[in-house]
Amino acid sequence: MYLAAGILVINATFWIEAVAFLLMLAVLARFVYPRISAAAEARQQQITEQLRKAEESRRAAEERLGQAEARLNEARTQAAEVIEGAGRSAEQLRADLKARAEEDARRVTENARKDIEAERQKAMDSIRGEVADLVVSATEKVVGERLDVGSHHNLIDRAIAEVGARDGRN
């Protein structure tokens, strides 16, 4: 049997091929397509699960980023506080050192004043002693005799008083 319908030639081979094609479709539909469909569905579920996990990971990363930014801001605040505290400490140390230096300078000045006064007093005592010796010597030469100790002291005291009175007037 041989039918010809334009390009398509319908003969026994055609019917065998059609039956083989339909059998192949039935086998594919019964055994292969459910597995392919199940695999595609499993893959789709796997992709959906991975997308869900990726979204959770993104949220967790954003949360960690927020926490890290908060810690960074806290660290910046603490660093500013430390710097401010160091500045205050430095200012306090500077003030303490200045006060100590001023106290040391005052003490040195006072000690120098005391030393100067002591040296002036020594010089005055030395001058008084020399004046007394000169007065005694001059008096012995004028009087021509040696004075006793009591007279000697009286004469010296009068001479010192006279010299002091003259210094006070000048």
Image (tube, helix red, strand yellow):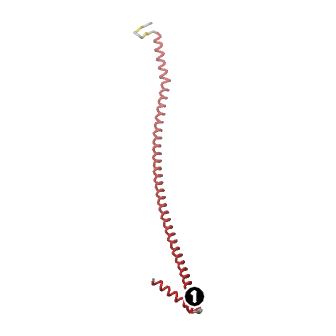
Mark 1 is on which residue type? Ser
**Image coordinates for residue 78, horizontal then vertical, percent:** 47, 54
The residue nearer to you, when weighing 134 against 108, is 134
* Along the line of sight, the residue nearer the viewer: 70 or 9: 70
Give the position of the C terminus as an image quadrant. Answer: bottom left
User: The N terminus is located in which quarter?
Assistant: top left
Q: Measured from the top left, where is residue 49 in percent x and y?
A: 47, 36
What residue is at 48 percent from the left and 63 percent from the top?
94
Location of residue 131 by image quarter: bottom right
Against 32, is 61 above or below?
Answer: below
Q: Tell me the residue at 56%/92% (across/down).
A: 143
Q: Secondary structure at mark 1?
A: helix
Residue 167 rendering spot, x and y as whole percentages? 48, 83
Residue occupied by mark 1 = 137
64 in relation to 119, above or below: above
The crowding category of the residue bearing disc 1, from other C-alpha atoms within 10 Å (few below 14, some 14 to 19, many at least 20), is: some
Image vertical order of residue 44 relative to residue 106, above or below = above
